[in-house]
Image (cartoon, rainbow, N blue to C red):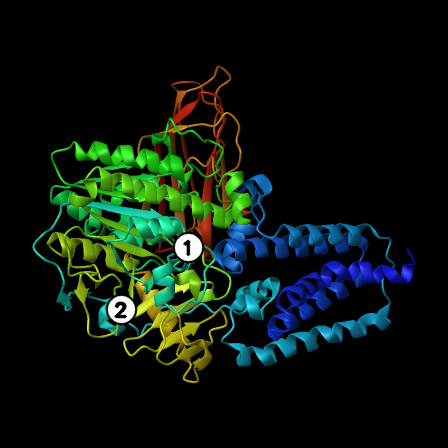
């Protein structure tokens, strides 16, 4: 190859995202195209000017980031933000999420990686200073992008940004909107402070006692044809027709909001009558351990106190995100995860049970509860519609997309489960809510990432409409269930009841795709992004907003909006000078024969914690080897912040444990600066080995 052609080869991976956008979208996304070109020119200048080793490093980072971003966009409908660094830079998590290399955009990824490898190996001579003029194009490209951004605010983030440009903007320009001293709880709108049961009651006298909450991992409202049509969305990627038929007598709630990403946050909102955090700080579910009085007001605790048997069953291992501690703290008396499914047929899905296995087991579980002489609450959580998405290859071939095939398999499994309950007469005695913990979104509009799903089967309630009017969200589930059952309402919960008609709009908030979305009682929608700039639209909602009418908020209310969001975030621990988080209390943990990765095999659920500036942390761990091979068990503790391994924190090593032996590890560290997304990874391996996690306590002294 002639040397003058080598720069062209070098430019292919740099400008590949721009070319791909042009090929797939034409000129419909000019802002995104200029962003792709601006970032491509910047990269081209750096790799041509720099030495060969730097060229290799930069091109590999570029290619991997673009490829992973394309997969994230396909999986959950959004680009990565700096908080996602905890996932994107962790090869172990990526390995699990990409298990089997089931790519949503295989051609894009393969061409990008291939051109990158070719550009790395060519013997390119470094450019001279005359080529520095290339850098001028970087500024020009980015200026064009910034110029056009305001004109194209109606387009999604993916339409306006190269993923690396968005990531950099999120990291560099995000403002920390601290809780303003002038803002108090009284500054919050009334609907975010108090319960609203002012609507007209739609319920008759026929009430059943059993409650079943089915939480479908990441399922978006767009998958239901009636909901999609009601929300004015012309087309959808797949329609869950079997679930629609199985819920033919249900009340559907089209305008249904999920408040954030991450399952643990959605589970808190579902069960505790509160909104999850509008940030990536320590999840409120974990903070419940610090506030037993508030935990006692969660739905499972309330029903347990009223005589119900309360059960929780999920398809994934419990220890991740501390659900083995969080769910009992909410009041669930019996909590089970992957370990309960001992006879599942398919054990190849990396995150847990397949949906057919899960709902087959869930059917058995429900029928066992029916044999009891007391009413029951059962919450179910699926996992197979989590990346890398579980589906048989025949279904993947049929639908041409693994994610859609996974949703299709879920459609069959959950519909079969509900029809089985109907056949056995269980639906005649059970209030059923089919919902989602979060939304994995869909390409086309970033508000899809806040669009959840809700179907309510309330036997004998003829007055309930097929399509419920008004905005509702996960926050409303506890109030709705208690309203239906006629149980007392706890003082601290907020929300509205699905079983009432309201004459007035309401406040609603979500934090997805890097934006705080705030819907007001007069139907104004504020969307505030990473740079502290808000756009406002009149007569709009979080879901299906009137984006064409959005304009920049000239009153600069971002500080107030983020300040109010911070008030909502911290109300569980307000005023606390110390926090004592428990992640172990005698649980038996089975060890894998070989460690696969720190995510799937983590023995403790102490993830995504935040430690304030000038705080001190004490960690106390006590472990007993229950079963061990003759060579013993060697445990290892790794601490990470945004998945970068943290250095400078000294702690004693774990001794080699023989069967029956115990060890106690204690250490402390200071936080001269705030730490966010801090995680403890405790791992070990050994065939037929197990440990008892007698204690894993993280005490945070906020007083310094």
Q: Position of residue 497 (x, y in %)?
A: 20, 61
Side of 684 where 305 appears, left or right: left
- How crowded is the residue under tag 2: few (<14 C-alpha within 10 Å), some, or many (20+)? some
Q: In the rendered view of the protein, which quadrant contains the N terminus?
A: bottom right
Q: Is residue 311 visible?
A: no
Please tell me which residue is depicted at 22% across the width and 54% down the height of the picture.
478
Q: To which quarter of the image does residue 205 belong?
A: bottom left
Pair 2/1: label in front: 1
Side of 340 where 485 appears, left or right: left
Q: Position of residue 508 (x, y in %)?
A: 31, 68
Q: Position of residue 321 (x, y in %)?
A: 39, 44
- How crowded is the residue under tag 1: few (<14 C-alpha within 10 Å), some, or many (20+)? many
Q: Secondary structure at mark 1?
A: loop
Q: Between 148 and 275, which is closer to the camera in this rendering?
A: 148
Please tell me which residue is depicted at 18% across the width and 35% down the height of the picture.
370
Task: Look at the picture and state if 687 lies above or below 286.
Answer: above
The residue singled out by tag 2 in the image is: 470
Q: In the rendered view of the protein, which quadrant contains the C terminus?
A: bottom left
The residue singled out by tag 1 in the image is: 239
Upstream in sequence: badge 2 or badge 1: 1
């Amino acid at each position: 190859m002639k040397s003058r052609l080598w720069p062209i080869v070098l430019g292919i991976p740099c400008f590949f995202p721009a070319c791909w956008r042009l090929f797939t979208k034409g000129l419909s996304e000019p802002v995104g195209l200029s962003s792709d070109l601006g970032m491509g020119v910047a990269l081209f200048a750096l790799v041509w000017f720099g030495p060969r080793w730097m060229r290799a490093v930069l091109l590999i980072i570029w290619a991997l980031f673009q490829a992973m971003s394309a997969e994230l966009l396909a999986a959950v409908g959004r680009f990565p933000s700096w908080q996602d660094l905890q996932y994107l830079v962790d090869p172990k998590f990526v390995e699990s999420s990409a298990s089997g290399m089931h790519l949503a955009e295989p051609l894009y990824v393969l061409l990008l990686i291939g051109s990158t490898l070719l550009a790395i190996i060519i013997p390119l001579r470094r450019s001279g200073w005359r080529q520095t003029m290339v850098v001028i194009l970087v500024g020009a490209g980015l200026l064009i992008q910034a110029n056009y951004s305001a004109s194209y605010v109606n387009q999604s983030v993916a339409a306006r940004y190269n993923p690396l440009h968005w990531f950099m903007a999120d990291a560099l320009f995000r403002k920390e909107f601290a809780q303003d001293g002038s803002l108090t709880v009284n500054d919050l709108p009334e609907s975010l402070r108090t319960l609203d049961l002012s609507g007209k009651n739609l319920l008759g006298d026929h009430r059943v006692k059993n409650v079943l909450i089915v939480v479908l991992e990441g399922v978006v409202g767009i998958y239901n044809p009636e909901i999609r049509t009601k929300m004015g969305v012309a087309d959808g990627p797949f329609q869950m027709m079997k679930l629609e038929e199985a819920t033919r007598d249900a009340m559907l709630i089209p305008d249904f909001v999920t408040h954030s990403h991450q399952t643990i946050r959605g589970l808190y909102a579902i069960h505790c009558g509160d909104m999850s955090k509008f940030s990536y700080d320590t999840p409120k579910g974990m903070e419940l351990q610090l506030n037993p009085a508030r935990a006692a007001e969660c739905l499972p605790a309330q029903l347990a106190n009223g005589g119900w048997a309360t059960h929780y069953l999920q398809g994934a291992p419990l220890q991740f995100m501390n659900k083995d501690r969080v769910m009992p703290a909410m009041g669930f008396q019996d909590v089970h995860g992957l370990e309960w499914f001992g006879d599942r047929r398919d054990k190849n899905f990396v995150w847990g049970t397949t949906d057919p296995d899960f709902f087959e087991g869930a059917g058995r579980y429900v029928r066992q509860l029916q044999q009891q002489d007391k009413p029951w609450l059962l919450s179910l959580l699926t996992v197979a519609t989590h990346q890398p998405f579980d589906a048989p290859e025949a279904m993947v071939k049929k639908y041409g997309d693994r994610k859609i095939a996974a949703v299709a398999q879920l459609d069959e499994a959950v519909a079969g489960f509900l029809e089985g309950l109907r056949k056995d007469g269980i639906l005649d005695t059970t209030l059923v809510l089919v919902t989602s913990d979060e939304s994995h979104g869909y390409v086309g509009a970033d508000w899809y990432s806040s669009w959840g799903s809700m179907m309510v089967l309330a036997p004998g309630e003829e007055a309930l409409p097929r399509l419920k009017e008004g905005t509702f969200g996960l926050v409303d589930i506890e109030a709705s269930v208690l309203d239906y059952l006629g149980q007392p309402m706890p003082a601290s919960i907020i929300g509205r009841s699905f079983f009432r008609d309201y004459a007035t709009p309401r406040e609603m908030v979500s934090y997805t795709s890097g934006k705080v979305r705030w819907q007001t009682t007069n139907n104004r929608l504020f969307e505030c992004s990473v740079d502290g700039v808000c756009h406002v639209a009149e007569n709009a909602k979080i879901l299906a907003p009137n984006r064409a009418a959005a304009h920049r908020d000239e009153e600069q209310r971002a500080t107030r909006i983020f300040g109010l969001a911070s008030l909502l975030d911290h109300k569980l621990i307000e005023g606390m000078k110390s926090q004592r988080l428990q992640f172990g209390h005698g649980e038996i943990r089975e060890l894998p024969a070989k460690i696969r990765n720190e995510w799937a095999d983590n023995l403790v659920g102490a993830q995504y914690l935040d430690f304030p500036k000038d705080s001190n942390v004490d960690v106390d761990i006590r472990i007993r080897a229950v079963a061990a091979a003759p060579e013993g068990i060697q445990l290892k503790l790794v601490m990470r912040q945004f998945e970068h391994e943290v250095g400078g924190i000294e702690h004693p090593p774990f001794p080699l444990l023989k069967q029956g032996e115990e060890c106690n590890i204690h250490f402390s560290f200071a936080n001269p600066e705030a730490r966010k997304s801090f995680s403890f990874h405790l791992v070990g391996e050994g065939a037929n080995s197990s440990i008892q996690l007698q204690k894993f306590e993280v005490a945070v002294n906020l007083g310094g």
